[in-house]
Amino acid sequence: MNWLPNADLSLLKKRAVIIQTIRSFFIERELLEVETPSLSQAGVTDQHLFCFKTHFIGPEISDVKPDVLGVPLYLQTSPEFHMKRLLSAGSGSIFQISKAFRNEESGRYHNPEFTLLEWYQVGFDHFQLMDEMEELLRLVLNCGQAKRLTYQQAFMLVLNVDPLSASLEVLKTAGSHLNLGDVLDNEADYDTVLQLLFCVAIEPVIANDSPCFVYDFPASQAALARISPVDQRVAERFEVYYKGIELANGFHELSDSEEQLSRFKKDNRLRKENGLLEMPIDTRFVESLKILPDCAGVALGIDRLIMLATEQDHIDNVVSFTIKGA
């Protein structure tokens, strides 16, 4: 019967308990739970992320020129921009458990609609936020102490190559045994090659026994993170992995509005060069960064976390309805 939910009801009950545990974790720490819009007049500029687009056919929004279908709106890939606007407005430390949307393939770890936990701690840097995330992971997953590696250390450990100094040719040679064929050979973008090597060679092996925090990503992959004052080659960004799954992505948040705008414009140039549509930049968000308090934030995939907590091997087993059955 194709109307039935994907997940067994017993797993959905476990899911509810886990989400309540997460919510209690933050309430006990006196973070404010917030709700922000799923729809926005701006999209995300990252060339590796794709937004769902729709149109608002009601009265015209004064500062947006509607096209023939109405005012373009985008389903958010993360609540990040709106949450930071709340931080700039003086909300204090906040968290949110919400739906997010990415127009990409569905698979073992992916559903185009998914549940995201995002939180921001005012006064924290990325190291303090890693400490707090480890507490949450140990509570939910009953796992051991997490490991920590710099991005550079992870590459040296697995591929014996320095991602901060190696040439593109050296990187490709380091990955020649991975059977990636023309995908690796024909790629000309340095960061895309790094990401490919990281996903295929490093993610599967660095965190099988306990979670692993990888930090100090290359400055070229800073996204919305600060550049390290200690080493300008790296950004104050981290990701979390466990049993071959990427769980979370966190930043010591950039508060330089001009630098962020420059990064967004660079993203759009890359999109254009790669034959992708340029995305409207969220100028309200950029403006809010001028008074963003010193903070660190992280987004964690709830569905993937529940997969690990309930020992499931496919995201379909822990969500009520996937895109295929919605």
Image: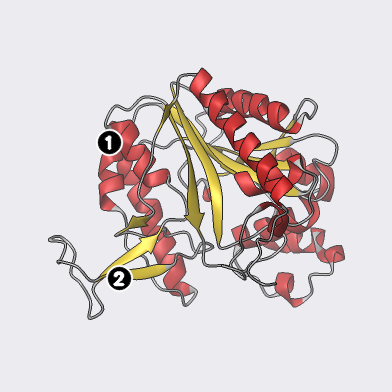
Foreground mark, 1 or 2, reads: 2
Q: Which residue is mark 2?
A: 55
User: What is the quadrant of residue 84 in the picture?
Assistant: top left
Q: Is residue 268 above or below residue 90?
A: below
Q: Nearer the viewer, residue 1 or 302?
A: 1
Residue at 54% across, 30% down:
23
State the residue lying farthest toward the front. Answer: 1
Percent x, y of residue 178:
84, 64
Q: Nearer the viewer, residue 168 or 280?
A: 280
- Give residue 127's mark: none
Percent x, y of residue 258:
30, 45
Label 2's element? strand
**What's the distance in space between the residues labelled 1 and 2, CA to CA?**
30 Å
Q: Amino acid at mark 2?
A: His
Decide which of tag 1 and tag 2 comes sooner along the chain.
2
Percent x, y of residue 59:
15, 66
Q: Nearer the viewer, residue 86 or 212?
A: 86
Q: Nearer the viewer, residue 176 or 325?
A: 325
Q: Which residue is mark 1?
A: 290
Q: Is residue 186 above or below residue 160?
A: below
User: What is the quadrant of residue 194 in the picture?
Assistant: bottom right
Q: Amino acid at mark 1?
A: Lys
Q: Is residue 16 above or below residue 189?
A: above
Q: Is residue 85 above or below residue 304?
A: above
Left or right of 297? Residue 36 is left
Residue at 70% across, 26% down:
139
Whether residues under marks 1 and 2 lie with C-beta atoms below 8 angstroms apart, the answer is: no
Q: Is residue 233 visible?
A: no
- Mark 1 Cα shell of 10 Å, populated few (<14), some (14-19), many (≥20): some
